Image: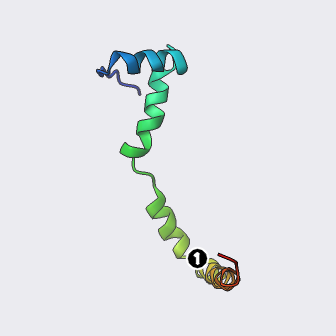
Amino acid sequence: MQKRLTITIDEKVYAGLHKIIGPRKISRFVEELVRPHVIKSDFESAYAEMAKDTVREEEALEWAEATLGDSAHEAR
């Protein structure tokens, strides 16, 4: 469900949005910019679920330790 929102912005900002984004695309543009800041993603529960997989965790640890050794020999 969508809600209507009225915001106030500088006329130069509006003109830029209208010119660059397009008159019928401003709402979507603003929503895509704002969404990650106001809607919490479900990363925490996904990471917790992944951590329960002990085989995967062991493989990830082995991989991380192996790549750490590789980076020690790289030129800086």
Depth check: give the residue in front, 74 or 69: 74
Q: Residues within 10 Å of mark 1 (few under 14, many from 20)?
A: few
Q: Is residue 69 left or right of residue 12?
A: right
Does any portion of residue 21 appear in the rendered image?
Answer: no
Residue on which disc 1 sits: 53
- Identity, as a three-letter code, of the amino acid under mark 1: Asp
For image coordinates 47% across by 70% down, the residue present is: 48
Give the image location of residue 40, x and y in percent.
Answer: 40, 50
Depth check: give the residue in front, 14 or 12: 12
Q: Describe the colour scheme in one phrase.
A: rainbow
For image coordinates 44% across by 23% down, the residue present is: 27
For image coordinates 44% across by 32% down, the residue present is: 31
Give the image location of residue 18, x and y in percent.
Answer: 48, 15
For image coordinates 34% across by 21% down, the residue present is: 4
Q: Taking 41 as reference, is 14 above or below it?
A: above
Q: Taking 28 as reference, is 22 above or below it?
A: above
